[in-house]
Image (cartoon, grey):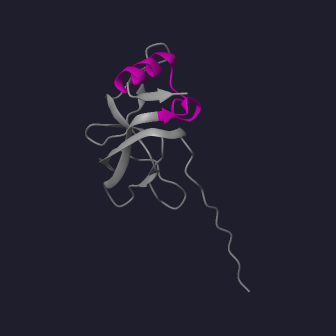
Amino acid sequence: MNFTRTTYDNDMEILYRNANLVTFSGTVLAANVTDADEHGKKYVTSGSLIDKDGNVVKQTGATGSETLSTAPIGILYKTVDVTNGDEACSLIVEGYLRADRVLDGFADKVVATIKIALPNIKFI
């Protein structure tokens, strides 16, 4: 008998509750996603900030002068595989999300900017 071990990862639950959840369809661009896993797959994980062009929004700048690479218009609802190119996605534009999972790793100044850019999303 031949057995192989496969590890599966699940999407991190970013919703605080489903009430008032509004999503729009969008596209995640693969061009700026460079981090691949051990199998060569490139993923954009749920909870990532996405701008109007489909790029992943990242925090840039040195400590104390952090900014966002571009202005976000939504938050990725489910993880998307962009290994073979651009992919369709659902972007959350209104709802209640978990701040500890979506905003983790962002500086306080950047969190304030995100909340201004996404006024219909409540972080709890």
Quadrant, the N terminus: bottom right
Q: Nearer the viewer, residue 95 or 98?
A: 95
**Which residue of the protein is positioned furthest toward the bottom in this rendering?**
1
**Magenta stretch, main secondary structure class:** helix
| Above/below status of 66 relative to 10 | above
| Above/below status of 102 relative to 61 | below
Residue at image position (56%, 35%) is 101
- State which region is magenta: 96-118
108 is within the stretch colored magenta: yes
Can the viewer see residue 28 in this picture?
no
- The answer to which image quadrant residue 52 occupies is top left
- Left/right placement of residue 87 relative to residue 20 reads left
* x then y, percent, for residue 113: 40, 20
* x then y, percent, for residue 45: 48, 46
- Left/right placement of residue 103 relative to residue 20 reads right
- The answer to which image quadrant residue 120 occupies is top left
| Above/below status of 82 relative to 67 | below
Residue at image position (32%, 57%) is 85
Q: Nearer the viewer, residue 120 or 106?
A: 120
Residue at image position (51%, 34%) is 97
- Left/right placement of residue 2 relative to residue 49 reads right
* x then y, percent, for residue 37: 52, 54
Q: Nearer the viewer, residue 69 or 73?
A: 73
